[in-house]
Amino acid sequence: MKTLALITGLAAAMALPTMAHADYANDRAMFENISNRYMIAMDAGDIDTVMDTWAEDGVMVTVFGEQHGKKAIREALSPFVGGAAAHADVKEGDTHRPRTRHQIINHVIDVDGNTAHTIAYWFAFTNATPQHDVQLLYMGHYTDELVKQDGKWLFKKRTVYNESLQNRKLYYPELGETNPLKK
């Protein structure tokens, strides 16, 4: 009987790290999925799917300001979703149109129960150029705070650093960079 209890205890102890690893792997897959879903929906013009990635009391910080709550975030994002300017030039009979495609990479994810912090790089390409080629449009990074609600991860706060625009800096401490002027 003691042997059976010992074997059962050892098996349970060995399973704990595997279960914890599986939970982290599942959470990480969900974080990457929500980020990718957000980007694809932005490019496709699907504001409803974009907003499904946000908590009701979410906060978005961009070069254009800070929005609090889903309603304010929707209003701020709507002009950019789907590259609205590119749609204005589409005419009957057109077989192609200008597009922007956002990419997100290099996720660093820290999970603490039902909250998480992530950092990721992003960049955007466009084919809306005079020579009809593809060019890098913007680049930057996100810092995100996520919250798990009803088993679903949502953005609680998303700070968008567009390193091509006004909030570009000499260095970004959140990315592990140090001030190059202080040696």
Image: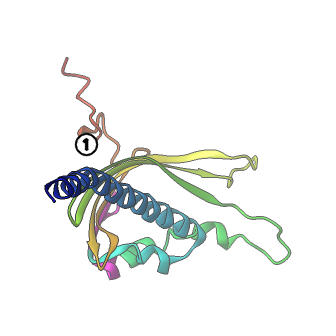
Residue at (50% x, 66% y) in the render: 37
Does residue 168 appear left or right of residue 34 in this picture?
left
Does residue 47 appear left or right of residue 115 in this picture?
right
For the stretch drawn in magenta, what is the main secondary structure? strand
The percent coordinates of residue 9 (x first, y second) are 18, 55
Q: Nearer the viewer, residue 122 or 10?
A: 10
Q: Against 149, is 103 above or below?
A: above
Q: Amino acid at mark 1?
A: Glu
Residue 165 in sight here: no
Q: Is residue 145 magenta?
A: no
Secondary structure beneath label 1: helix
The percent coordinates of residue 92 (x first, y second) are 82, 78
Residue at (43% x, 65% y) in the render: 34
Mark 1 burial class by Cα count in 10 Å: few <14, some 14-19, many 20+: few
Q: Nearer the viewer, residue 121 or 60?
A: 121
Does residue 6 appear left or right of residue 100 in this picture?
left
Residue matched to label 1: 174
Residue 83 in sight here: yes
- What is the span of residues highlighted in magenta in the rendered image? 58-72
Q: Against 122, is 60 above or below?
A: below
Q: Is residue 71 magenta?
A: yes
Residue at (57% x, 73% y) in the render: 45
Quadrant of image for the C terminus: top left
Q: Nearer the viewer, residue 124 or 76?
A: 124
